[in-house]
Amino acid sequence: MVTFESFPPESPTFGSALSASRNPYDPSDPVNLVFVGDASADRVAWALQGILALGWRPSLTDALRHARVSRPLRGLLKPLYAYLDDRAHGGAAGWKLPDRTLVLYKTWSPLAHTRLHIRIYACHRPAHDSSGRSGEPAVWSVAAAHLEVYSPPLGHTVKSWKAAQRYIRRAFAKHPELVQAYFEKDTHNARDYQGVPFDGMVTYILLTPGFRSLPWWVRYPRALLSKLGVS
């Protein structure tokens, strides 16, 4: 288990890897990103798709998994679960499916493509900022991101955990209006996942409070200028 205690007010505790069998001894993908602050899965996905404007879009397989399809078809989709524990905040401890799943195609053709893939899991229940600074709920999410290539007929093969992690970290780092701080933390869980090495270093990203009553181009004028090509 990983705890996050050095950056108040949030203290996420989570399993360091995803699992298809909901068993910590059967790891599949490493958790390599943690978002804290005003960091619901929806807000992280919204930032990737909107503010960062990178071209992310919802995963088709995730949409099918949540749809009313037959059990054999759901089995083919190989859902992955994350273990989140926020009992300290009055929440729950247990495995859950991703709240948001996005893909970003780097190369594409009908027979072969390379893409980034991220699964985002929000905490069971928000914590509360006990520092007295804002009184805002503190929401955290964990994510597992990777770079993969298409493996016919229906699969994908992971090529790198770190490439996707670095890509997302750099994208957020370019928007100080969205990110208060970020740093790397060693989860002491370095090993090979699906035959691909991971160094155990997780990126923590503290997001700024959101103002949902205003449109994004008012909340983040620097992002608007960037979209307009104004430096």
Image: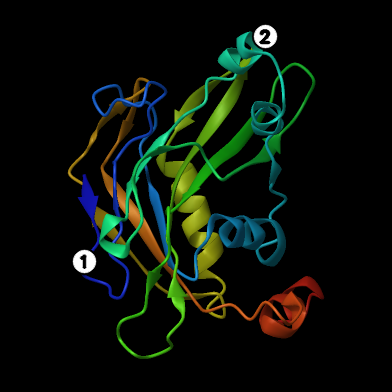
Compared to 165, does 74 lie above or below? above
Foreground residue, 50 or 133? Answer: 133
- Residue 117's x, y, as percent? 57, 38
Q: Residue at x 44, y 34 (%)?
A: 160
Q: Nearer the viewer, residue 164 or 127?
A: 127
Toward the left, the furthest residue is 188
- Quadrant where the C terminus sits is bottom right
Q: How many marks?
A: 2
Vertical placement of 75 versus 228: above or below?
above
Q: Position of residue 4 (x, y in %)?
A: 25, 61
Residue ID at (62%, 55%):
45
Badge number at residue 72: none
Say which amino acid is labelled 1.
Glu
Q: Position of residue 110 (x, y in %)?
A: 79, 20
The label nearer to you, 2 versus 1, is 1
In 3D space, how far apart are the residues under numbered discs 2 and 1 (Cα atoms)?
A: 44 Å
Q: Earlier in the sequence, mark 2 or mark 1?
A: 1
Residue density around tag 2, few if under 14, some if 14–19, many if 20 or more, within 10 Å: few
Q: Which residue is mark 1?
A: 5
For label 2, the residue is 153
Residue 122 lies left or right of residue 9; in this view the side is: right
Residue at x 66%, y 32% (from the top left corner): 66
Q: Residue at x 30, y 86 (%)?
A: 131
Left or right: 190 in relation to 121: left
Q: Secondary structure at mark 1?
A: loop
Q: Residue furthest bottom?
A: 133
| Res. 203 image quadrant | bottom left
In the rendered structure, the answer to whether residue 188 lies left or right of residue 80 reads: left
